[in-house]
Image (tube, helix red, strand yellow):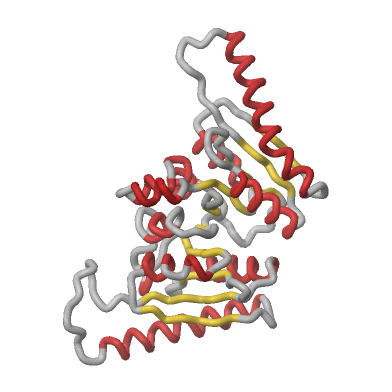
Amino acid sequence: MIQPIVVGTDGSSPADLAVEWAADEATLRRRPLHIVNAAERWDYDVPFHTAPGICESLTEVGEHILAEAVERAAKAYPGLPVTTELIFDSPARALRSLGRRAEEIVVGHRGLGGFTGMLLGSTGLRVAGHVPVPAVVVRGDAGERRDEVLAGVDLAEESSGVLAYAFETAALRGAWVRVVHAWQLATALPAVSVHEAAAVTQERLADAVAPWRAEFPDVGVVEQTPCGHPVAELAGRSSRAVVLVVGSRGPAVRRRAGHHGLCLGSVGHGVLHHADCPVAVVPPPE
């Protein structure tokens, strides 16, 4: 079965951008598009007896939102296979429930209506890092055509998922890849040690990227190891990128973590708030 690109929408402007991004992804990756609207029957996750007519009203509104999203996707990408689903649940739970049946999950950076919680710190953060597939939070000027895929790599963590997604995306979009590993100085480090540390870091990054250079020989690559905070270094470069790719923590960490940001990691959390382009959060291989 071909897994679809799944996108959540509530009819807001950020959600419209997410639908357009997802339709573009589906076209490039030769996948169907599955558009979801979540309608909550209660507030604050406290169930109560549903008032007469509320389900019919939520259904009517949700179906209208979905119909508009289908029209938007079809107008931009005629012939793209599109399905829809209205789910009576919270936005985060609705999208996470589709994680095993999706190629990728896409959300806007904030939202309204059925996706009231889609402000960073809520739905975006409750999805990114909590699904077993890449989750894209569409930020910045997603409609601007750019030719760079920016990948943030942590050499202390498994990076194959991030690099695989970055190189594949660049190949599909006719773009090139900028791989960045930012590192910070230890206090009172001698100058000679700084130069040695920088050289070793550059060499380690080159070793990590080498297999992907070989697998995608037609994709241009730039490797950078700036000395600075990872969030600042990545966010500062994001205005030139079509997408910024970062990793999330592994399944064991996700199971132990009680706070949503712990699953995502501090760098992923930071760039979701500050990047000027869509951010793809990629889980490590299981």
Tell me where residue 74 sits by quadrant. bottom right
Q: Residue 122, how many percent across, how many down?
A: 35, 58
Is residue 154 left or right of 45 when viewed as pictured? Answer: right
Is residue 35 left or right of 45 when viewed as pictured? Answer: right
Q: Quadrant of the N terminus?
A: bottom right
For the question of whether residue 211 can be seen, the reply is: yes
Count of numbered labels shown in the rendering: 0
Residue visible at 37% across and 47% down in the picture: 261
Is residue 274 left or right of 192 when viewed as pictured? Answer: left
Residue visible at 70% across and 55% down in the picture: 168
Residue visible at 48% across and 48% down in the picture: 248
- Nearest to the observer: residue 159 or residue 44: 159
Tell me where residue 44 sits by quadrant. bottom left
Q: Residue 272, how many percent across, how many down?
A: 47, 49
Q: Residue furthest left?
A: 49
For the question of whether residue 13 can be seen, the reply is: no
- Nearest to the observer: residue 145 or residue 177: 177
Q: Residue 242, how many percent across, how many down?
A: 64, 53
